[in-house]
């Protein structure tokens, strides 16, 4: 409650002596000039029973007092006496009609009365006089005092007060407040400061006799904070005079953002306007912004403002600011997919109270970044970061097939000579083995020989003539130029036979084995990446290795001779086929996939993070390796 000053409410006046000579007026004499002070005078007709009341005791009639002086003090009577030696707490004042009707007498009057006492109606201030209960400028009501014929005490002025259309002269505190006087300078009281959207709680300080000072806000400075309080009472959480306003319904112009009802449309434009206007704050209204925020030195971006520019947490829908990134192809952009670019930004570059969502990257191996920081110092507070997905890598190119212009025609081994039935003795004839063949590949990466082995000769039907003796076995074929294990091994000759010669039942030679085949090795997959101009690039998989030239086939064995009276010599074995040329290259490796990054920091940078949450995205799949090239058949 306010401290109230209680002063006497008696009606006294500037006195003049009956003779007109003020200097001749002696307070010890009770017959000075008549000045009506608004008192009805003593009542002398009431019967007196018992002893009379002494000085300071209550009374309703002068005859009740030993001094026969009863004065009105506030709302009641009190026995007094003529001045001479007034005790402490009393002053010597002239009062009309207190001793002799129509004359002023100087009597002891209490200095403490109803003046500036709180009240709700006049009767609380006086029962008989014209003292009023008046309303002060701050709306509080206090007792005043009639000053029609009496000067006001120090600290009060006699003013006209209109009550119900009638003017009354009343003593009013010169400080314009009964609860702020020279007695209590420095006292403080709460007050309200109206703003565009609400009422802000301020404080007034008592300046003594000059009354209450202006209603001051809690602070002259107001950076937005987690309390969302309007500390400087300008209507918003933050200093409106030091910021640029941004709203989705705004318009980007050369003058936008200086006031709340002319906002800019995008955050990045608002940042540029702040820099040009020497303001260091950007206030962002609720909504979704599809853009790349380009931070600037010494500028803080504050989200969380609703449509009435009152601030709250982004978790509340009416205060939610959501920024969705895109391809950074604007001025200074590097063509990356991101939401916030902080390049060359000095502290306190800052983002607060919003949702930052990374874009889905487009293009093989492209990464997505929510916040990309290079050569900068920034702060992220009360921000939710939702990482976007990286793009898949691309498949590797197929390897080069063997050069079709390299020799490949007629690379089949020669056909062995036929066997034949004879009636006469023949110890030398046989089917000849087929020829082996070779191949040449000018563009082959392999040096492996591809020559095949020739076939073996067939067996003779007789060992000696003119005598018909036993037949012989066929010859084995010849191995290919390159042998690996059983690959390229020649077939063995067929054994001699002694029956069934006239039925063609000669014993065949063995089949030559096919040439060796060796495919190129698969390329190794990559599991890392590199920084390329400050951005992530997934490593490319290793290419597949090249295969070797095909080995030639082994020659077939010759058929065995036959001797059973009607004899036959064996057929020759066929020559092996030549190996084919190797493919010119293996398939190339697939490219690395794009990454998914919440905050990506490079090159002498720092990021102060507080109260943030990160939702991870998905990196892309790496590209498949290319198919290997095909060798010659």
Image (cartoon, grey):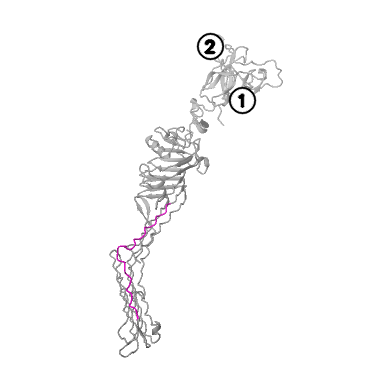
User: What span is in magenta?
Assistant: 390-419
Answer whether residue 587 is magenta in the image: no
Mark 1–mark 2 Cα distance, whole angstroms, equals 43 Å
Give percent across and percent down for residue 413. 32, 73
Element class at badge 1: loop
Query: Which quadrant would residue 133 be assigned to in this image?
Result: top right
Tell whether position 391 is magenta. yes
Sequence-wise, which precedes: disc 1 or disc 2? 2
* 523 relative to 186 in the view: left or right: left
The residue sitting at the top extreme is: 19
Mark 1 or mark 2: which is in front?
1
**Where is residue 73, by image quadrant?**
top right
**What percent of the width, then of the height, locates residue 511?**
37, 77
The disc label shown at residue 24, or none: 2
Q: Which residue is mark 1?
A: 120
Q: Position of residue 61 (x, y in %)?
A: 67, 18
For the C terminus, which image quadrant? bottom left
Magenta span: helix, strand or loop, mainly?
A: loop
Which mark, residue 507?
A: none
């Amino acid at each position: 409650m306010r401290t109230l000053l209680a002063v006497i409410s008696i009606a006294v006046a500037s006195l003049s002596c009956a003779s007109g000579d003020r200097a001749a007026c002696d307070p010890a004499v009770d017959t000075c000039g008549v000045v009506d002070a608004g008192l009805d005078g003593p009542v002398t007709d009431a019967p007196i029973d018992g002893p009379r009341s002494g000085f300071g005791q209550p009374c309703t009639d002068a005859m009740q007092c030993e001094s026969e002086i009863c004065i009105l003090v506030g709302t009641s009577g009190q026995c007094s006496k003529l001045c001479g030696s007034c005790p402490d707490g009393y002053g010597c004042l002239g009062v009309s009609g207190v001793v002799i009707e129509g004359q002023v007498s100087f009597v002891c009057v209490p200095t403490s009365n109803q003046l500036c006492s709180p009240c709700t109606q006049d009767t609380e201030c006086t029962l008989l006089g014209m003292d009023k209960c008046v309303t002060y400028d701050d709306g509080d009501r206090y007792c005043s005092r009639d000053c029609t014929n009496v000067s006001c005490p120090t600290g009060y002025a006699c003013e006209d007060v209109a009550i119900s259309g009638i003017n009354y002269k009343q003593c009013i505190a010169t400080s314009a407040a009964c609860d702020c006087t020279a007695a209590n300078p420095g006292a403080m009281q709460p007050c309200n400061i109206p703003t565009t959207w609400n009422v802000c709680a301020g404080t007034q300080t008592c300046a003594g006799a000059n009354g209450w000072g202006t209603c001051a806000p809690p602070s002259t400075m107001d950076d937005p904070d987690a309390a969302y309080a309007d500390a400087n009472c300008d209507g918003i959480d933050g200093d409106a005079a030091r910021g640029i306003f941004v709203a989705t319904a705004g318009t980007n112009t050369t003058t936008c953002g200086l006031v709340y009802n002319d906002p800019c449309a995008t955050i990045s434009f608002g940042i540029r306007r702040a820099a040009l206007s020497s303001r260091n704050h950007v206030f962002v209204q609720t909504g979704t912004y599809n853009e790349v925020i380009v931070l600037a030195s010494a500028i803080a971006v504050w989200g969380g403002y609703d449509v009435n520019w009152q601030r709250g947490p982004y978790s509340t829908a009416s205060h939610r600011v959501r920024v969705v990134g895109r391809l950074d192809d604007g001025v200074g952009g590097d063509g990356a997919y991101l939401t916030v670019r902080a390049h060359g930004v000095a502290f306190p570059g800052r983002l607060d109270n919003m949702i930052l969502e990374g874009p889905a990257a487009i293009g093989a191996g492209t990464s997505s970044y929510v916040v990309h920081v290079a050569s900068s110092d920034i702060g992220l507070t009360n921000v939710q970061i939702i990482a976007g997905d990286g793009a898949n890598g691309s498949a590797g190119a197929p390897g080069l097939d063997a050069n079709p212009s390299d020799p490949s025609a007629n690379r089949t081994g020669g056909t062995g000579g036929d066997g034949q039935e004879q009636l006469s003795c023949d110890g030398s004839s046989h089917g000849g083995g087929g020829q082996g063949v070779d191949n040449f590949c000018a563009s082959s990466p392999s040096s492996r020989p591809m020559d095949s082995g020739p076939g073996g000769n067939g067996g003779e039907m007789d060992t000696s003539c003119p005598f018909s003796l036993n037949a012989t076995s066929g010859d084995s074929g010849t191995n290919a130029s390159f042998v690996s294990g059983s690959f390229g091994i020649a077939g063995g000759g067929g054994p001699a036979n002694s029956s069934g010669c006239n039925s063609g039942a000669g014993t065949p030679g063995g089949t030559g084995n096919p040439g060796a085949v060796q495919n190129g090795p698969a390329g190794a997959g990559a599991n890392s990446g590199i920084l390329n101009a400050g951005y992530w690039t997934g490593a490319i998989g290793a290419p597949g290795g090249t295969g070797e030239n095909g080995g030639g086939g082994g020659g077939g064995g010759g058929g065995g001779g036959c001797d059973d009276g009607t004899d036959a010599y064996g057929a020759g074995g066929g020559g092996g086929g030549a190996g084919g040329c190797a493919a010119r290259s293996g398939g190339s490796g697939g490219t690395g996939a794009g990454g998914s990054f919440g905050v990506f920091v490079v090159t002498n940078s720092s990021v102060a993070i507080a109260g943030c949450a990160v939702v991870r995205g998905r990196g892309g799949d790496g590209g498949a390796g290319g198919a290997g090239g095909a060798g010659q058949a």
